[in-house]
Every structure is written in structure tokens, then in C-alpha cells.
């Protein structure tokens, strides 16, 4: 019985201590500086140097620093994060006086819209997620349209009549890439077979696991696919590497123009094209709008029409089929082709 | 005789305090060295951590973050206590939280009925999922490490299958999630400033008391620990080892089912593609850190929360983001090694003492004999 009382006492004291401790003391918000320090940017998993999605955002930031003379602070998400981690990251940027505060990736959607309420004077931006607040700019992209064009290129270039799609994580965002790609292939050449596979069903680790992408790409190559489109952030580098080792096969890059990425220079002769998502333009536009005191509001859609998304031509590997691509592009812009955003 | 008991107690106290102290000092020295190697000032890092970590909003954040960690650690510790390595807590809590979220999102009962229902569904699903590993171990002899790892993948894929538009989830922007649990069935929060503490703290405390009571104060707990020490000895004294394996896996899974509840009932109110993963593995580290003891694990979970809270701040101050991960690893290693070192030292010391006493006794009886010989 004595041990029971001792234990109970220990528990109550700990709980009481914890509770009283939280009730007093200075909050970190009280002691934070409030100067205008420039852009606060929170990257998604994979970080600045993922040669893809995050790097596109980083380019926009670099351009803003150079041309608009703003300062900046960058933080990066880790794996297995919870909402609390993301909220803290966004809050610490806003608290320190950065404006705008930008979250790269739809995972920041909830946390940015929540934190924005506490900092009404700061402009927030979130890539790939809609705005739900007055001071939040949602920057969304028509990934399916660029992916459709990638599908056209794949269908025209395949010799085995089998092409593949590798998605990082099976979520609604990546399904837009898959849907556009599949539709583009089918409507160009119904005989071409598309295999679509994902690295992870739900875990965002799919965006920074190049080893998993390597295995997946290897399996697809062995099965006879000769053009593979990977929408998997940093993981995509893994599939590009494997594809570059097999002659006569092509990789299609994503988000950044991956042919131009210094980190992928070794494999660039195998990068047919990239479905580019101009996150850099969106980030730059947002920073500029804040600098000009006319901050962007609401959700802005970046699509094929105004070059928010595009198909890269560097390397010149798709010059021979450029007319087909241009035709498809025109039909999408004119609304003749409706690209689905779910497979 | 009395004196030696006193001595023994003092030694035990020194040994008990020695291990954590040794671990703490070693961890501080090693992390300082690591920070130093990256070319930064370690003392400033510790200052930032203590300063930022002790802010009132940080304290709330740390406690809230520690709740699921603590539950996961207890789920793992039940297995550890009987030498069962349940790596499947991760899959167990996710699949449990998923189905609990599905049930919670599809019903609109009054809160006092629905909250317990959601929690019970989670516990049952967790228990069923972990019992698969337990049953396979006792019937087919498959090691639980293999089955629980595989079951993690199966759980993730199962959730991935159902978590699609038109199956059990709805599409919301770029996320899929189960329908929201109605506001009447949200768990209460404890109003503290500046942010509230999650009411699910109560769940963790109740579980901790039950954990301590069942393992330390019941026949079942005694059997469980006995199996952990020695299977053969336990079965010789009439304990059915197979039954203990299944029961403790089920118990472990039941607690694992609770791990997702703080997030589900206090934060997200649905299970979406952004539901936190990996807490089960954190639980393993914390169970090691807390030596499978309810209070030790509570401290370990709080320490983990503290490190994560202050880690972002360190990145903000220009330190490498990975420093905190290194610290967590170093601390766990230091604790495990320090306890082993101290245990061995204590063992040697005890052996020496016993040896000395025996030698002294032998000497005494020798002199007695000689004396007896002389007198005879």
C-alpha cells in the first residue's frame, strides 16, 4: 500500500508541477522581435536541394533576394512530422517578423491557414493548397495539364509501346500528375500501355526516398517500359539515375526543368523533358506583391494558359515532336481538351 | 549485520543515481563535440534550448507532443518486460486510429457515448492487429519482429487503399481524409495559457497507472515479468508461456490503439494523408530511455518533446537541423550503455563483497580450527 501512495503522490506532483508551470512564465511570442526581416520560407521534406519541387521554390526566393533586395530565412521539414511541428515552424517565422511567410507543399495548408489568424498583419503563402483566410495566398497549379503534355511526349517517343508513371505518395496531388499523364498518353496513342505505381501509400517519405524510386524504376524497366515519368520530389533523382543506365530509355522529370539541374548533370542525356511547375514564378510574384504593398490574396491558379506550368524543351530531345506538343497545348488552352485531375 | 544492510542501501542509491548521471554527462559531452565539429558554439545551443524550451507556450507544446509518445512507449514496454519486441506499434496505432476515425466520422451520437466508443474501437482494432503477430508466434513459431514489421506495411497499404475518394475518405483540396468527427465528440482540453493542454493527457495518466498496477501489483504482471526473465523457469512454475505471449501482445496492441487518440480527438478530428506516422518507433526509443518504467518513460517522452520543440529553434538560429536527431540518438545510446556499465560494476562489486565475506568466514573457521587443534 505504501508504494501505491508514493506512486500516486509522484504522479500528482508531476502533473501539478506541469500545470502550474504552464500557467505562468513568459510566452515565446512576448519576447519575439517584430521587425520586417524579409521572406520566411518553409520547405517540404527533401529541402532546398531536391533538384525538383523545393528547388523550384528556392529559385523564386533567390531571384527575389537578388532583384528585390529582401532578406530571407529558410527552414526545412523533416520526416514523420505532425501538425504541431509544422505549426511551430510557421509560427516561429511569423513571430520573428518575416513577411511574407511561405510554406512549400500542401502539407502546410492546414497549419498556415491556422497560424495566419494569429498574425493578421503578415501575409502568408502556401504552395499547392487553397487559401482559407484573408491574409493567406493559395498558390495552386494545374499539374495535370503539364503532365498531359508529358504523356503526349511519352506516347510519341516510346518504342516498346509501354510507358510508366512513378508517384511519390498516393495522394490527391500526385494523382493529378498521374491522371494528366495517362490521359495524354491514351489520347495520343491508344495502343500504348501505361503502368502507374506509387512508392508509398500515405507516408510523405515517398518524396525523399531515392532508393525506393530506384527499385521501382528498375522493376518498370525490366517489365519493358522505356519512358518513365516520376512525380516524386527528391526521390525522382533515384529513378532518373537508374533509367540513365539503360540505353534507349527516357526519364521525364518533374517540377523543375531537371535537364538543367546541376545535381543531375550526369544523367541529363536521359532526361527527355520535364513537366515544369513554375513554383519559382509563384513565390517571386508573392514576394514582389508584398514588397509593393499589394499582397496577393485568395487562391491563384497557375495553369498552362499563363505558363504557370509547362513542358521543358531543354536538351532538344523533343524538338522532332514539338508540333504535336504545341497542338495539344493549344487545345488545352482553348478548352478543347479537358484534362482530368483524378485518375 | 545492521551496518551491512545500511551500507548496501547506500551503495544501491549510488548505483541508481550513477547511471542516469553518467548518461547525462556522456550525452552532453558527445553532443557538444558534435556541435563543435559543425563549427558552432555548443554552449549557445544549450542556452537557446533551455531559454526557448522553458517558455510557457513551449511547455504546453511539449506536454501535448509527449502524450502520444508516452502511450507508444508503454505499448512497447509491455512487450519489452517479457522479452517480446513489438516493432508493430507503428502499424497498430495507425490502423486503429484509422478505423476509429471512420466510426467516429460516420456517427453522431452524444459525445459521452461517442468518445468512449471511438476509443474502444481503436483499442480493439489495435489489439486484433497485434494479436495476429502473437498468434503466429505461438502457433507457427514465427518471430514477432518479422511479423510485426510486415504487419506495419500491410497496415499502411490497407489504410492507403481505403483512404481514397469514394471508399472511406473524402477529398479536401490535395488531401484525403475520413469524414470529420462531429464537434460534440471532440475531447475536452485543459484551459491553460497561452494554449490549452490536450485533455487526452488523462488517457495517458490512467494508462500509466494501470500499466504500473498490472505489471507491478498483480499475479499476471508477476507471470509476465517471470517469462521475461526466464521462459523455462516460468513454465516450470506453471505459467503458460504461449498464453502469456498472446495476452501481452494483445495488451500491447490495446495500448497502441490509444496512441492515435490525442491526435484524432484533440487535433485533427479525422484521419487524413497527413496523419502522423512513425510514433511507434519513437515509442521504442522512449521505452529504452525510460527503462520500461512508467515514470522513467514519462520523463523520456517529455525530454523527446523538449528536444523536438527546441530543435526547430536551433535550426532557426543557424544550427544544422539534424543536430536534434543526433542528440536523441546519443541520449538513448548513452542511457542504454550507462545502465549496462553500472549494472556490471554493481555485479562485480557485489561478487567481490560476497567473496571477501566468504574468505573472512573461511579464515575465521580456519583460526577456530587451529585454536581447537591447539587446545586439543
Image (cartoon, coloured by chain):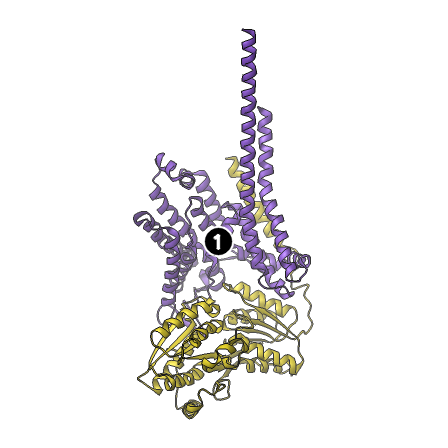
- On the picture, is A236 further left or further right than A296? left
Residue A172 lies in quadrant: bottom left
Determine the secondary structure under disc 1: helix
| Point 53% across, 46% down: residue | B295
Q: Position of residue B364 (x, y in %)?
A: 56, 18
In the rendered image, what is the letter of the chain coloured yellow?
A
Taking depth in this image into account, of B246 and A156 the one nearest to the observer is A156
Rendering coords of residue B235 (x, y %) = 35, 37
Give the residue drawn at x 37%, y 81%: A182
Residue B273 in view of the camera = no
Residue A30 visible in the snapshot = yes
Relative vertical location of residue A60 with respect to residue B233 in this rendering, above or below: below
**Which quadrant of the rendered structure holds the C terminus of chain A?**
bottom left
Q: At 58% across and 83% down in the image, what residue appears? A: A285
**In this orientation, which residue lies closer to the viewer: B75 or A94?**
B75
Q: Which residue is disc 1 drawn over?
A: B283
Tell me where residue A271 appears, x and y as whole percent. Answer: 46, 81
Amino acid at each position: 500500500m505504501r508504494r501505491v501512495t508514493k506512486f500516486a503522490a509522484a504522479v500528482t506532483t508531476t502533473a501539478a508541477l506541469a500545470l502550474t508551470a504552464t500557467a505562468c512564465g513568459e510566452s515565446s511570442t512576448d519576447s519575439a522581435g517584430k521587425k520586417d526581416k524579409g521572406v520566411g520560407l518553409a520547405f517540404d521534406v527533401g529541402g532546398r536541394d531536391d533538384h525538383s519541387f523545393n528547388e523550384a521554390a528556392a529559385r523564386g526566393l533567390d531571384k527575389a533576394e537578388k532583384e528585390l533586395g529582401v532578406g530571407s530565412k529558410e527552414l526545412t521539414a523533416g520526416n514523420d512530422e505532425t501538425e504541431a511541428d509544422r505549426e511551430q515552424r510557421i509560427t516561429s517565422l511569423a513571430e520573428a517578423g518575416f513577411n511574407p511567410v511561405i510554406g512549400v507543399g500542401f502539407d502546410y495548408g492546414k497549419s498556415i491557414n491556422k497560424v495566419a489568424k494569429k498574425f493578421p498583419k503578415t501575409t502568408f503563402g502556401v504552395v499547392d493548397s487553397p487559401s482559407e483566410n484573408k491574409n493567406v495566398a493559395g498558390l495552386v497549379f494545374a499539374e495535370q495539364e503539364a503532365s498531359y503534355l508529358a504523356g503526349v511526349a511519352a506516347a510519341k517517343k516510346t518504342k516498346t509501346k509501354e510507358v510508366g508513371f512513378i508517384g511519390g505518395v498516393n495522394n490527391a496531388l500526385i494523382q493529378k500528375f498521374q491522371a494528366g499523364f495517362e490521359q495524354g498518353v491514351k489520347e495520343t496513342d491508344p495502343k500504348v500501355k501505361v503502368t502507374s505505381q506509387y512508392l508509398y501509400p500515405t507516408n510523405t517519405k515517398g518524396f525523399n526516398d531515392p532508393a525506393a524510386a530506384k527499385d521501382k524504376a528498375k522493376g518498370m524497366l525490366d517489365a519493358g517500359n522505356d519512358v518513365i515519368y516520376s512525380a516524386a520530389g527528391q526521390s525522382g533523382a533515384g529513378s532518373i539515375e537508374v533509367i540513365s543506365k539503360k540505353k534507349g530509355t527516357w526519364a521525364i522529370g518533374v517540377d523543375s526543368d531537371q535537364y538543367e539541374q546541376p545535381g543531375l548533370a550526369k544523367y541529363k542525356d536521359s532526361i527527355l523533358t520535364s513537366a515544369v511547375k513554375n513554383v519559382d514564378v509563384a513565390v517571386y510574384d508573392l514576394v514582389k506583391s508584398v514588397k509593393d504593398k499589394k499582397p496577393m490574396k485568395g487562391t491563384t491558379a497557375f495553369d498552362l494558359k499563363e505558363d504557370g506550368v509547362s513542358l521543358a524543351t531543354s536538351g532538344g530531345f523533343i524538338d522532332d515532336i514539338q508540333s504535336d506538343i504545341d497542338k495539344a497545348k493549344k487545345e488545352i488552352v482553348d478548352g478543347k481538351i479537358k484534362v482530368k485531375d483524378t485518375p | 549485520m545492521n551496518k551491512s544492510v545500511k551500507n548496501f542501501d547506500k551503495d544501491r542509491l549510488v548505483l541508481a543515481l550513477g547511471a542516469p548521471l553518467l548518461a547525462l554527462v556522456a550525452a552532453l559531452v558527445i553532443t557538444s563535440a558534435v556541435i563543435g565539429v559543425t563549427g558552432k558554439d555548443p554552449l549557445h545551443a544549450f542556452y537557446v534550448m533551455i531559454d526557448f524550451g522553458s517558455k510557457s507556450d513551449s511547455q504546453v507544446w511539449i506536454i501535448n507532443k509527449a502524450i502520444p509518445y508516452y502511450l507508444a512507449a508503454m505499448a512497447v514496454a509491455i512487450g519489452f518486460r517479457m522479452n517480446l519486441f513489438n516493432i508493430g506499434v507503428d502499424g497498430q496505432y495507425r490502423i486503429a486510429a484509422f478505423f476509429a476515425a471512420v466510426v467516429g466520422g460516420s456517427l453522431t451520437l452524444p459525445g459521452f457515448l461517442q468518445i468512449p466508443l471511438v476509443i474502444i474501437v481503436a483499442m480493439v482494432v489495435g489489439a486484433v492487429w497485434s494479436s495476429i503477430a502473437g498468434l503466429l508466434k505461438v502457433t507457427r513459431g514465427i518471430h514477432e519482429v518479422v511479423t510485426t514489421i510486415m504487419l506495419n506495411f500491410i497496415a499502411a497499404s490497407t489504410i492507403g487503399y481505403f483512404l481514397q475518394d469514394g471508399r472511406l475518405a473524402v477529398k479536401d483540396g490535395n488531401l484525403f481524409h475520413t469524414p470529420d468527427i462531429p464537434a460534440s465528440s471532440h475531447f475536452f482540453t485543459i484551459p491553460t495559457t497561452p494554449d490549452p493542454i490536450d485533455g487526452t493527457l488523462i488517457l495517458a495518466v490512467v494508462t500509466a497507472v494501470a500499466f504500473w498496477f498490472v505489471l507491478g501489483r498483480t499475479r499476471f504482471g508477476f507471470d509476465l515479468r517471470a517469462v521475461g526473465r526466464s521462459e523455462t523457469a516460468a513454465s516450470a512454475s506453471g505459467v503458460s508461456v504461449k498464453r502469456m505471449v498472446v495476452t501481452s501482445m494483445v495488451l500491447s496492441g490495446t495500448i497502441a490503439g490509444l496512441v492515435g487518440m490525442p491526435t484524432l480527438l484533440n487535433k485533427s478530428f479525422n484521419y487524413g494523408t497527413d496523419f502522423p506516422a512513425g510514433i511507434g518507433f519513437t515509442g521504442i526509443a522512449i521505452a529504452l530511455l525510460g527503462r520500461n518504467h512508467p515514470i522513467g518513460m514519462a520523463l523520456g517522452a517529455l525530454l523527446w518533446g523538449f528536444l523536438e520543440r527546441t530543435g526547430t529553434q536551433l535550426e532557426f538560429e543557424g544550427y544544422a537541423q539534424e543536430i536534434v536527431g543526433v542528440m536523441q540518438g546519443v541520449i538513448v545510446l548513452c542511457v542504454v550503455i550507462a545502465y549496462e556499465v553500472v549494472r556490471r560494476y554493481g555485479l562485480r562489486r557485489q561478487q567481490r563483497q560476497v567473496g571477501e565475506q566468504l574468505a573472512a568466514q573461511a579464515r575465521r573457521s580456519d583460526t577456530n580450527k587451529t585454536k581447537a587443534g591447539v587446545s586439543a
